[in-house]
Amino acid sequence: MRYWLMKSEPDEVSFDDVLAAPGQTVAWFGVRNYQARNFMRDAMQIGDGILFYHSSCAVPGVAGIAEVASGPYPDATQFDSAGKYFDPKATQAQPRWISVDVQAKEKGRYLTLAEMRAMPVLEDMVLLQKGSRLSISPVTSGQWNAILEFVRTKD
DNA sequence: GCCAACGTTGGC
DNA sequence: GCCAACGTTGGC
């Protein structure tokens, strides 16, 4: 059982979009970074915890709690020549990019990036390191517990 | 829109 | 294999 933070642009897929999806589950598509891909392919297990993070928006932060709901499988968007995630070097026989399914579990208090930076327990988070841009990053159990406690706090 | 930081590409 | 140029990310 591991924990992860996964970034999504809410204009594209927000946490509410996942909550509204059938089974509260969506395919995590569009990862085009090898390190992030390798986390999905090699390290993620069904049931791992996910911090669903909203990036590139007015108030970036953790929007909800989710869970890994499938093993890795080829990301369909790499084969769509009309789409923005098309990769001409990927083939059906040798896919380059993968997806996992993500299921929304719990929506509580929104934890902003600014609030995260103010929490000493989170100072070592990969997300908060200078220059860090990884769209999928590991989270320790200590970081996870602190964030879960915040998310479950009433305002 | 700016720009720092990072990843990828491609010439050599 | 080096590294400059370019493209992307993502906060502000």
Image (cartoon, coloured by chain):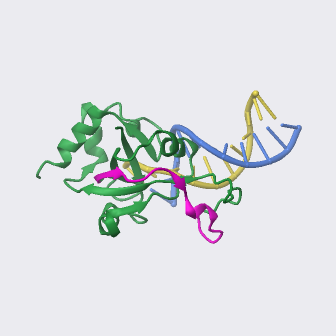
Chain colours: A green, B blue, C yellow
Q: Name the residue nearer the viewer: A85 or A1.
A: A1
Q: Please check the rendered image and state whether residue A82 is part of the magenta-colored stretch, yes or no.
A: yes
Could you tell me residue A38's position as x and y percent? 53, 42
Location of residue A16 with respect to C8 vertically, above or below: below
Q: Quadrant of residue A123?
A: top left
Q: Name the residue nearer the viewer: A18 or A131.
A: A18
User: In the figure, is residue A89 to the left or right of A39?
Assistant: right
Could you tell me residue A50's position as x and y percent? 34, 47
Q: Name the residue nearer the viewer: A65 or A123.
A: A65
Which residue appears at 34% of the width and 57% of the height?
Answer: A103
Q: Please check the rendered image and state whether residue A15 is part of the magenta-colored stretch, yes or no.
A: no
Could you tell me residue A68's position as x and y percent? 38, 50
User: In the figure, is residue B9 to the left or right of A146?
Assistant: right
Which residue appears at 38% of the width and 53% of the height?
Answer: A69
Could you tell me residue A21's position as x and y percent? 34, 68
The answer to whether residue A41 is seen in the rendering is yes
How many numbered marks are there? Answer: 0
Q: Quadrant of the N terminus of chain A?
A: top left
Furthest residue in direction left, as rendered: A154
Q: Report the span colored magenta.
A: A64-85
Location of residue A63 with respect to A82 vertically, above or below: above
Which residue appears at 53% of the width and 46% of the height?
Answer: A37
Location of residue A2 with respect to A151 vertically, above or below: above
Q: Name the residue nearer the viewer: A50 or A118.
A: A50
Q: Quadrant of residue A75?
A: bottom right
User: In the figure, is residue A74 to the left or right of A18?
Assistant: right
The answer to whether residue A62 is seen in the rendering is no
